[in-house]
Image (cartoon, helix red, strand yellow):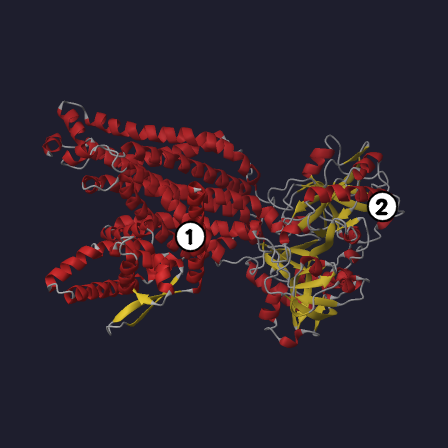
Amino acid sequence: MRSLFNWLRRRNLERGLDRELQYHFDRRVADFMAEGLTEAEARRRATFELGGIPQIQEEVRDVWLTRWARDFVHDIRISARTLRHSPSFAITVILSFALGIGATTAIYSLVDQVILHALPVREPERLVLVDWKGDPVANGFGSWNLMSYPLCLDLQKQDRVLEGALCRALTTVNLSTGGEHRPESAELVSGSYFPVLGVRPALGRLLTPDDDRTAGASPVVVLSYDFWQNRMSGASDVIGRKVLVNQFPMTVVGVAAPAFRGLDVGEVPVLWIPASMSVQAIPGFKSMLDRRTRWMQILARLKPGVDIEQARAMLQPWFKALLDEDMRRPEFPRITPERRQRYLASTLEITAAPQGHSGLRRRWGQPLWVLLAATAVLLALACLNVAGLFLARGSAREREISTRLALGASRSRIGRQLLSDSLLLSLAGGALGVSLAPLAIRALISFLPREVAPTALASSLDVRLLLIALGISLAAGIAAGIAPAFQTGRESLVSSLRERSGSGFAGIRLRKVIVTLQIAFTLVLVIGAALFARTLTGLLAKGPGFATSSLISCTIDPLRSGYSREQAARLTRQIRDEIRMAPEVQSAGIARFALLLGGSWNNPMVIVADRRTVAERDINLNAVTPGFFSTLGVRLIAGRDFEEQDTQASAPGGRKVAIVSESFVKQYLAGVNPVGVRIGEGSGPDVKAEFEVVGVVANFSYRGLRDDREQAFFPLLENKNEGGTFYVRVRENPEPAFARIREIVHRADPALPITEMRTLDDQLNRSLNTERMLATLSSAFGTLALLLSMVGLYGVMSFVVSQRRREIGIRLALGSSRGAALRLILRDALFMIASGTAIALPVTVALGRIVEAQLFGVKPADPGTLALAALLLTSATLCAALIPACRAATIDPASALRVD
Amino acid sequence: MLILQILSLGANHGYGIAQRLEQVSRSVVQVNQGSLYPALHRLEQKGWLRAEWKDSETGREAKFYSLTRTGQKQLALEKESWERLAGAVEWIFQEGSR
């Protein structure tokens, strides 16, 4: 630190030292003269005594800054000066570095934000996620790691192990502030949420256990800092204001700390609502205190000194007793003995959760790691490329270096000089890369699923990330410079000085190794790109099973706008009828749950054909109106579609009907006439198979394009049609239809928000964003890598040709054919390509396991893909080698021999 | 230590220190004047000395060194350890002569 400061003020120090020494010298001379010496003699004596001023200066400089550091500074300055003389070389190297470092920094930034970043709460390392391992015998709704609210209350009492426990559920509420109505993301939390996390308020107070004592008794909310700043312009009188949550008035009591954005990086809530208000926040939800309803995630804070293993062991006896106690409750469902056994064998799964709980992390964790691995390979490639360039430059500078060696420079000193070249360039490249990284991050974020609030992820780089980028730059600089540095002066000094034209084969073997490695790395990336591209095209070719063009969808949810069930059903019916009558609309249907959004309603089913069976896995379920299938264009294979009379709660004769998918029939009703078969929702022995199958439809995608679950559909009953997703087939363009639907809904209720309004083409694209991101980025990486390899191979082969010019000239003069010369050079290139491929293929197979889950319709070791990628690489790189090879073939023997 | 001891008597400039050194240790130690300045700068880097430009007795500006608080402590420490060593050596000699 001090030496850095010294270095910065070195000019000042130098001047001071000069004056100081001058003073000493002058005084000494004066004294000697006073003793009677002549001035010349006095000067001589004084100089002799002092022992050489430059020497003292050097010694003092060593005190200021260690010798090593001074040499380094010197090296960097020489590097900068020499590199200015070869700008094209410097620019190529800087761009290579910038590419690798920028890409790595950008991807790492996302990995850090999505996967690694700890919550901004007190001691996040003590937070754990508590999950149920086994059969919870409960209905779940929500995403993952679901638990019941009463279990969280029980856990809070385990104060021997835990400092506290909290539970939370994400939901969407219609939030009205000052005349604006918008669906916003909210976190329903236990009263212990803020105290356990240790978050402070920015204003007012946060929620406390008192807010969570009695259901419905505490209509208070805490706002997020961002929402308060951006949407309420940071009004200081916000405390005490009323906001409408699903049209229910609640009071703002506080604003959370600025950095705190909830527990899920991908879903930033704008407000926190006590769980006691769940009836108001989730319309129709009355199961907060039900032990058999799982809907929240539980996080807990371990006591200091208690680790996860201990916590698990200490909680298990209590949990065991709880299972027994729960089973004896009267409301516990009747279950089969096997299921009871599975239930009783349940344990609590406790995992470290300093980063909170995130669905985004779950979906994106793996793809992001894959991308990080790919960028690391790209960075390695960039380093190899630079190392190759340095070696090429090194052989051009051979004479200079040999001269310096001859003048007494040590090899390590010259090696250090070369290393400082590459360090300087890597730092410059790093700076350029880092300045471009935010753009890259923004582009990456645009691939993220739409639910991710734009505020959730930042594209700016913080200090920590800059340090990491600096570290990467230094490492890359050293990695790229180390081989050329070691290479210097390997050759015998005498021989390289003696040679007149250029040099011998200095470094050519090393350069060939580097190019071979480049080819290997490139092949890995090209294969990855091919796999992801095939996944994407495979999914697109498969399609959702219905025609997406001229199909649009939109969702309304009147229950969240304070409607009663009857009112909501009436409103939905009215809107549906008006949409159907609109001139832009061909047909329309409603589904209870939207397609291609990643979620589904699913449950096991009982199927009664010739005997009673239970479905092996959950069936995807949906409730739809008549005309839904025909609007989508889904083919009816057998039986009939739903009819209006099926939607009456009391159908004639009390008949309840269902339609199943083709895959359902194939899986469970093979060889049976499906029409007339009875099915029921659930798996227990007491489940009644009350639905009669009246039709079979072709398979189509529900959760997403990869989804191939069996499906069953119920008619959306008229009096339960409380909103849902409209699917509308339009006559011409979607835009006028959008406007018409907006107008219809607005006329029915101006305060009712419409969500997810888009074409199905758009929806389909959104559902493929992970696949698209992987395919796009890996193709980009593969192309860049291919270019780098081609340049590398071209460089080496050109060098080889210029080295062997004389040899080839002699061969040609002795009657060898031009074809033979061509082959001679190409054989060299082919050998490198073949060895690169031989290295890459086993690596790819090993890496395949990482990406397997991301693929669709293609195996990681798919021979066709591997062969295609290898062929592409071979032909591209051979093209690059062909140019120097052709040059070799067209050598004029006479001029080649005349060179020396 | 010698430099610290000289400076403990009062601030002085490089030339003055050299003169003093010559006086006190004329016969005993021969200090190369050339190595005086690196030593001074090293002590300054360590924070034992403080330097400032002042007019010297000849009227020309010179760089005056003086002891800092840590320098004084260091001097005391070195004195003490030197005395301990000297005492020990003396004790050994007396033991041997007895």
Looking at the picture, do discs 2 and 1 lie on one chain?
no
Q: Residue at x 68, y 73 (%)?
A: A239
Q: Nearer the viewer, residue A398 or A593?
A: A398
Residue A640 appears in the figure:
no
Is the residue marked by circle 1 packed among few (<14), some (14-19), or many (20+) residues within 10 Å?
few
The residue beneath circle 1 is B82
| Horizontal side of residue A196 vs A649, given as left or right | left
Q: Residue A753, which numbered label?
A: none
Residue A89 rendering spot, x and y as whole percentages: 27, 48
Name the amino acid, label 2.
Answer: Asp
| Label 2 vs label 1, nearer the camera | 1
Residue A530 rendering spot, x and y as whole percentages: 46, 38
Write down the chain letter for disc 2: A
Write down the chain letter for disc 1: B
Q: Nearer the viewer, residue A468 or A746?
A: A468
Residue A366 appears in the figure:
yes
SS for callout 2: helix
Question: In the rendered view, would you say A319 is above or below A669?
Answer: below
Image quadrant of residue A206? bottom right
Q: Residue at x 78, y 62 (%)?
A: A212
The residue beneath circle 2 is A326
Is the residue marked by circle 2 packed among few (<14), some (14-19), or many (20+) residues within 10 Å?
some
Which residue extends farthest front?
Answer: B98
Which residue extends farthest top?
Answer: A815
Name the amino acid, label 1.
Answer: Trp
Image quadrant of residue A476? top left
Residue A419 rendering spot, x and y as whole percentages: 32, 45
SS for callout 1: helix
Q: Quadrant of the C terminus of chain A?
A: top left
| Horizontal side of residue A571 vs A98, given as left or right | right
Residue at mark 2 to residue at mark 1: CA–CA distance: 81 Å
